[in-house]
Image (cartoon, coloured by chain):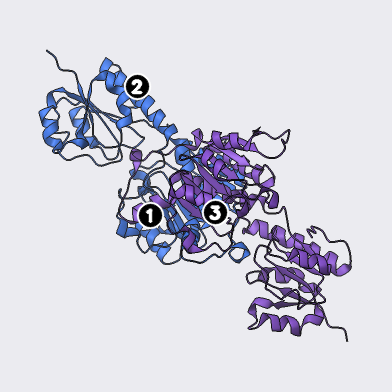
Chain colours: A purple, B blue
Amino acid sequence: MASKPLILQRDPGLENFYKVIVRFGEIGRLSDQPDPLAYAREHAGTIRAMYCAGTLPNLPGLIEALPNLGMICSLSAGYEGLPVDLCKERGIIICNSSGSNADDVADTAVTHVLAQQMKLLSKHNAILSGVFEGGLRNIRRSLMETRIGIVGLGAIGLCTAQRLAPHGCDIAWWGPRDKPGTPFRYEPSLKALADWCHILVITGRADHSNRHMIDKEIIGAVGPDGIIVNVTRGMIIDEDALIAALKAGKLAGAGLDVFEQEPTPAERWKDVPNVTLTPHAGGAGTYSLQRYHDIAAENFDCFFSGKPILRRVA
Amino acid sequence: MASKPLILQRDPGLENFYKVIVRFGEIGRLSDQPDPLAYAREHAGTIRAMYCAGTLPNLPGLIEALPNLGMICSLSAGYEGLPVDLCKERGIIICNSSGSNADDVADTAVTHVLAQQMKLLSKHNAILSGVFEGGLRNIRRSLMETRIGIVGLGAIGLCTAQRLAPHGCDIAWWGPRDKPGTPFRYEPSLKALADWCHILVITGRADHSNRHMIDKEIIGAVGPDGIIVNVTRGMIIDEDALIAALKAGKLAGAGLDVFEQEPTPAERWKDVPNVTLTPHAGGAGTYSLQRYHDIAAENFDCFFSGKPILRRVA
């Protein structure tokens, strides 16, 4: 008697996807197992597919333990936690749910822009420590008079610009190529954009070609009065240089949803002034989740019915 | 020899206004004096006008010490810190700089909405304490799926709605009267608005007629899944009821720029969960400041040239 396929849920917190794919097989929650590798080996014969949070690191030895694994599906845009080379060697398909989270990630970018501009955390903490520096004693730059530079005008960058526009900000953007027809001004030099803007918002795609593109020089161009916000990938910024600039007062603040290493170590940020930090939560909204599920369900449907996989990334 | 008029700057932090009004007389900074009342009495003969932050409490005995005072100018919309009855008796004109800060106050409303929706402070503090609950393990309601109820669609309410609209929120508003022609849906019942919305944003004018309009019943209608944001006047909300609801889990969060008592005592908020607090800083932006200065300068010009005062409020 042929067994039903067993579909592995690698990471905790993805339980809601259960109802979407239970029609393809049984679900095995790896993170609930006292010895996940032993569990994987025990069921290796029937495990053909796995889903996970693609930005989290893979469990060492897991892929090797699963000779029948044919597909790994990331329930987000990210898949950098996955062993791409090993999967290619083995012919294991990697697919993601890309392009579905721009609204939520843009909301996150705007949250950091506004919280930084308002100095929300220091004001909040001041009140709790008995200092109420209200009214006109503590004037901030109005968004009506703020110049925003956006790095990368893909779906996330465009959603971010559209959300900031009614605040009266002056908006320009840089990317490797102009996109005629967009309503926002293109600036052909990243350095010139950083010099010009008060707040540089990173919304661009990351790969090894633009690692540390936001380096000491660009950070210095944003300057002691400027703010950097990053919501796409930590590797785009030279994070050591960013931290050094914040500590030296050469950058006024940073709002970060992404980090070079995730989870980012708490001690790395202990004495860094004027940061707002969120845990790669940009796309973690109900609206994106529904889209992740819809796209991932299509991936599973294709895989189990032998059709070409949508959103295949490797 | 007639003395030049002496213009009193009552509160610290208003120094930038100096250049706007120095042409009318000398400036005396009351807050720099070791004994402000003695200083006022000493110069009482030449003090004809005073400017201040209108929301801050007046120095007891100051008005009484100034028999020649003819005008008090608030460098903001607020004037509730001023002794209106006493000024009326004495024929002292009170004027403000109303209507000039809607953009900055709306930015502040949106800052609190986004910070609350993102649970920014608890996420930030979690990272600093070593907990990185990222990705899909911690799903928030997307703004794309959030219903916003706005209380009062004046200049601030309209600016707030316009800024939230591109986030994809569903927006409705309540006020004592419908305003035909506004692009946002009018809800004739405040209770129904509170029942319907996920986030209730208070942007309405306050006076004694609507004190505690946001009472236990309305707070309960916003409910355990809901958020209240207030950026206009603390007295609109029954703050004790708000705090009780937050502590009991009957309201999910609150973002407050204004308080029933200002400065609000730190100990009042020590054990209140899920709040973001800013110190009545809504209008404290460079853009509003320029407008406060422009309007206040007109007030001073009228006063010293004997013309009717613009923006007279009492």
Residue placed at 27% from the left, 40% from the top?
A: B81
Residue placed at 27% from the left, 15% from the top?
A: B305
In depth, the one of A268 and B90 nearer the eye is A268
- On screen, residue B149 versus residue B52, left or right, reads right
Q: Residue B52 is drawn in which quadrant?
A: top left
Residue placed at 29% from the left, 40% from the top?
A: B80
> Depth-wise, is mark 2 or mark 1 nearer the camera?
1
Q: Chain of mark 3?
A: B
Above or below — where is A178 with respect to B274? above
Q: Chain of mark 2?
A: B
Which residue type does callout 3 highlight? Cys
Q: Residue A171 is drawn in which quadrant?
A: top right
> Depth-wise, is mark 1 or mark 3 nearer the camera?
1
Q: Chain of mark 1?
A: A
> Depth-wise, is mark 2 or mark 3 nearer the camera?
2
Q: Residue A159 is drawn in which quadrant?
A: top right
Would you name the residue on which mark 1 appears? Answer: A125
In depth, the one of B178 and B246 nearer the eye is B246
Query: Tag 2, which secondary structure?
Result: helix
Which residue type does callout 1 highlight? Asn
In depth, the one of B242 and B53 nearer the eye is B53
Would you name the residue on which mark 3 appears? Answer: B197
Above or below — where is B225 with respect to B95? below
Q: Position of residue A19 (x, y in %)?
A: 72, 71
Would you name the residue on which mark 2 appears? Answer: B298
Query: Tag 1, which secondary structure?
Result: helix
Query: How far apart are the two marked residues, 2 and 3, measured between alpha carbons?
Result: 42 Å
Q: Characterize the local packing of mark 1: few (<14), some (14-19) or many (20 or more) Cα atoms within 10 angstroms.
A: some
